[in-house]
Amino acid sequence: MQIEHRLGDYKEIACDLLAYPVFEGETRDASLDLLNRITRGAVNAVLSSGEFKPEFCKTCNIFKPAGLKARHLLLVGAGKKSQFNPARLRQVAGAAVRSAKPSAVKTIGFLFRGDHPAGLASRLAAEGALYANYESDIYKTRNKEEREIETFLLLFGRKVAQAEVREGIRRGTIVGDATNFARTLANEPSNILTPSQFAARALTVASQTGLIARVMEREEMEKLGMNTLLAVSRGSEEPPKLIILQTHKDQGKKRGPLYAFVGKGVTFDSGGISIKPSDKMEEMKADMSGGAAVLGAMVALAQLRPKHPVIGLIPAVENLPSGRATKPGDVVKSYLGKTVEIVNTDAEGRLILADALAYARTLGATHIIDIATLTMACTIALGHANAGMMGTDQKMIDRLRSNCRITGEGLWQLPLDEEYRKAIRSEIADIKNVGDRWGGAVTAGKFLEEFVEDTPWVHLDIAGVDLEYDGWTFACKGATGFGVRTLVQLLE
């Protein structure tokens, strides 16, 4: 999709479809009244009849509207104007694209409404359009959705700085493409996206975008003593990989903060010996969504060049049962030196993250964020609207939370009191990898905290938000790419 800024009066813009956001209750708005007059009362007709109510992301398509050069006029519900934050602008732009696709539309003109700065508005509309144009039907050979929008025109009803808009489009395109890249990774079946293939794709995209990348193999992990990571991969014939990425060549020489993003990369999770029920097990191909988000964010940041250097670590493994697999009750020694009793092999994500988090500190990380589809307990607590967030760096937690109005990715802070550590005390080792059934999302966080020690750290549990099951008005079903925008916005 090409995204361009087009000058001129919107009624004179020749396009297949003109998308016009409408707010709830704006019956006396001058600009809407002007549109109604241009279209000879067509807008008021659908509003007054109740055919169209401008609820958030609802749409109404008027074919061959009078007074416009556009072939279609699409009214897009923008909801209440007081709630029209930047994230909602992105979704409204996406809803326009999704609604237009069945009509064989190739060119959309999107008219901005609201008072968002032109650069930010351009960036978010670009992200929303790219996100909405994406389809998850990767391997369909027939009945495949081929109706992609070719051109998305940004139209302003006010004078704006051209350079600001161009930069917004550039940034939005980078982040939008990176998010869709993460979605593609998470949508891939596990027989195709193995740990080795995950590493190979990371190396390829790194060479294309200027990231510095290397892959740590099993032998080096064994020498370093990364036994909690290795314990998870023992049951699989696929070798484990630790993908290491960095944005700046001279990051070790710079004084100041060094951020580390650590993403869970379990390309398939059967639960190991503690095997999962068969129902919905196919969704465990997306248990590497945290790793995909880290790779997507690093790809975007390599092009955006933030002030502070960033490193990304993705431990990539399969968790399968076999005669060699780790068994409940086994004890292993982590890279940090702490011993772990593995009482449940289905609590594998925290095991691979433990060694990756500790290694990030060895690389000089001063601030760490991990992102993982870690616990069903978090999904039970928060549903599919918010990811769980906890950690030891309250300043970073507050920044992440305040950015939600821009990213559109919901985050909710959970407690991390010391009282929760009692649940993961082991009688035989320093710590065990699961507690009882109560507060499971938090006790998982307490386990991870053991391996970051005094380094400022935030944990994002995205288990309930990595997949969309029903499809949104602004996006298809499948992987959401959750986390890419959150991580990029933090560094931006």
Image (cartoon, helix red, strand yellow):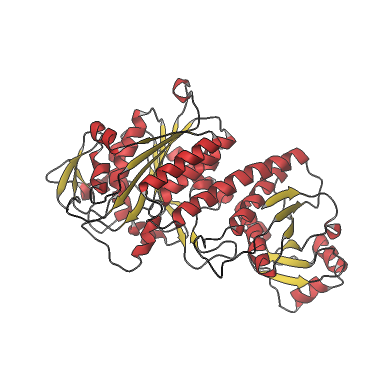
Q: How far across and down, in percent of the image, does residue 273 sit?
A: 20, 57
Residue shown at 52%/63% (left/top)?
Answer: 137
- Extreme top residue here? 253
Q: How far across and down, in percent of the image, does residue 33 sit?
A: 83, 65
Residue shown at 42%/48% (left/top)?
Answer: 290
Q: Quadrant of residue 313?
A: top left
Vertically, is 20 above or below 432?
Answer: below
On the picture, is 432 further left or further right than 145?
left
Q: How far across and down, in percent of the image, does residue 492 sit?
A: 56, 37
- Extreme front residue here? 141
Residue 264 appearing in the image? no
Residue shown at 59%/36% (left/top)?
Answer: 304
Q: Quadrant of residue 336?
A: top left
Number of numbered tags placed on the structure image: 0
Residue 433 appearing in the image? yes
- Extreme left residue here? 428
Q: Quadrant of residue 453?
A: top left
Residue shown at 22%/56% (left/top)?
Answer: 321
Which of the two residues, 266 or 194, is positioned nearer the viewer here? 194
Q: How far across and down, in percent of the image, does residue 93 sit?
A: 66, 57
Which of the two residues, 438 or 213, is positioned nearer the viewer here? 213
Which of the two residues, 236 or 332, is positioned nearer the viewer here? 236
On the picture, is 370 further left or further right than 490?
left
Vertically, is 191 above or below 365?
Answer: below
